[in-house]
Image (tube, helix red, strand yellow):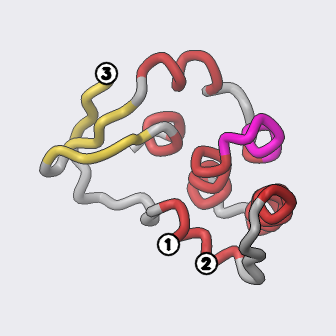
Amino acid sequence: MKRNDYIFTIGFDGNKAIVDRQVRARYGRLDARALADKGMFQAAYRCAVFEDDTEAARYVLEKFNEGSSIKYKDTGELFKVFGVQRPSGSIIGIRAV
């Protein structure tokens, strides 16, 4: 799965990822920090996970905590908060909508 397809996945249909085409086109060049600064926390966290960037994941956590009433302590908690799974080889295609 390509980076931007993973970052902007909004759901799944069997073994295909459903990707937000417009958001991918508009924000696909941004890194995790820039996405977090824009308030796009799920995409920012997906970016950090895809790139295996622990510093970026911490940044996303800090930015998210700034505006959240619940303060999370560990970046691993964001997997559940945002419904993120690590990239998987079981996804064999995408559908951009």
Amino acid type indicated by mark 1:
Lys
In this rendering, position of residue 1 left or right of residue 40: left
Q: Distance between the residues labelled 2 and 1?
A: 6 Å
Mark closer to the chain start, 3 or 1: 1
Q: Quick check: 54 above or below 16?
A: below
Do callouts 2 and 1 mark residues in contact (Cβ within 8 Å)?
Answer: yes
Query: For numbered disc 2, what is the local secondary structure?
Result: helix
Query: For numbered disc 1, what is the local secondary structure?
Result: helix
Amino acid type indicated by mark 2:
Glu
Which residue lies under the disc numbered 1?
Answer: 80
Image coords of residue 4 (percent x, y): 52, 35
Magenta extent: 33-40
Which residue lies under the disc numbered 3?
Answer: 97
Q: In which quarter of the image is residue 55?
A: bottom right
Report if residue 19 lies within the magenta region: no
Quarter of the image that includes the C terminus? top left
Image coords of residue 78 (percent x, y): 60, 69
Image coords of residue 24 (percent x, y): 52, 25
Badge 1 crowding class, 10 Å Cα cut-off, few under 14, some 14 to 19, many 20 or more, is few
Q: Distance between the residues labelled 3 and 1?
A: 25 Å
Which residue lies under the disc numbered 2?
Answer: 77
Q: Quadrant of residue 76?
A: bottom right
Q: In which quarter of the image is residue 45?
A: bottom right
Q: Is the magenta stretch mostly helix, strand or loop?
A: helix
90 and 71: which one is in front? 71
